Each structure stands twice: as C-alpha cells, then as structure tokens.
Image (spheres, rainbow, N blue to C red):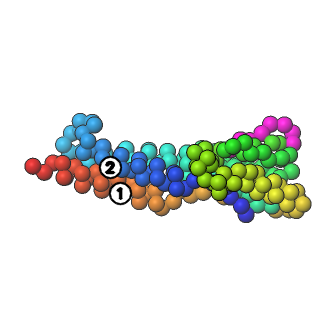
Amino acid sequence: MGEIRRSALINYFAAVMCALFAGGVPAAELVVLPGWVPAWAVSLVVALPLVELMWRSGLRPRLVWNDGGVLVVRSLTASVYRWSAIARVEEEFNRLHLVFAGGGEEVWEFDQLWLWSKLSPSYAARRGRNEALLTAALERGRAVGEVVRPPERLPRRPVALYVLVVLAAVLGQVLVSVVDRP
C-alpha cells in the first residue's frame, strides 16, 4: 500500500502556531469577557476550530492506493477509484491529475515548495516522483485486475492535535494568571 500526504512538518508547525495564538487570546484582551468566563475556556473555543482547520486542510488530505485502486481523501470528502477507471496520472508542479478513461479528472494538491526546489537540488529532484509512484501502481493494479478491493479506511485525527488544544487551554490560563498579577 502506498500513500502521498501533505507535509506533516509544515502542517504541524501551523497547528502549533494556531494553538499558541489561541492560548494568547485571553491574555491579549482581544475580547471583553465577563469575569466568570475562565481563560482556558476561551482558549479552547478559539483553539478547537483552528486546529480542526489544520486537520481538515493540511493533515487529513492524502492519496492512498493498493493493487485494487486509489482512495483520494480531501478536506471534507473522500472518493475511491478502481485502477481500471483511470487512464493515466499526470503531475503538474504541486498537483496530481488522475485522468479518467471516460473523460474528466480528479485533481489533488500536495506540498511542493517552490523556494525549496530553487535552493535545494535534492528537493528539486523530487519532481515527478509522485507521478512515477502512481504510474507504477496503475500498471501493477491493471495487471492484478479486479481481485483486490481498493483502500477505504479514512485517516483518524492524531492524538497530537488533542494535546495541542489542551496545551493551548493551559497556556491561556497561565498567561492570564501572569498578566493579572500586580
């Protein structure tokens, strides 16, 4: 089974930044809240949607394949395609196009940083790697036939995201207690 995901490093960094921002919201007094509202609750209300956004947009999307076909996981939906329905795979900078035999295509974006490819020859050498992987899987899948079921299991949220939300709430409470000291 193969898989192509977006960059975990980039997306976890963004999730940590979102959690830090959410933790700082109560202490920054961006909103005037009644005194009975705890700082940790404010941090949770801000952190949960931000971290969910990072999960949906950066950490959940992926392409997963086996000999039976390919599973395209997007931010809100997922689609399963058998190899027999796919005519070819094309890579265009940071996009993979699954071109269907009956017409139409599925476009999936992955992380390919333009600046890194200009600075690092080894990073630039990655270009075309995803297309080669999927083309090889397409050929193998066609050879095996319709015997194998395509992957259907969707990814689950990593525990690290829940930990980030809890840490944001703790940070919010600590910052408010530090700011409130005379």
Across and down, in percent, residue 42 comes to 31, 45
Mark 2 near mark 1, Cβ–Cβ under 8 Å? yes
Q: Residues within 10 Å of mark 1 (few under 14, many from 20)?
A: many
- The residue to which callout 1 is attached is 167
At numbered mark 1, what does the secondary structure look like: helix, strand or loop? helix
At numbered mark 2, what does the secondary structure look like: helix, strand or loop? helix
Residue 103 is covered by the magenta coloring:
yes
Residue 24 or 120: which is nearer the viewer?
Answer: 120
Three-letter residue code for mark 1: Leu
Q: Residue at x 60, y 57 (%)?
A: 155
Residue 158 or 107: which is nearer the viewer?
Answer: 107
Report the magenta residues as a range.
101-108
- The residue to which callout 2 is attached is 23
C-alpha gap between disc 2 and disc 1: 8 Å
Three-letter residue code for mark 2: Gly
Instruction: Let me know if residue 152 appears in the view.
Output: no
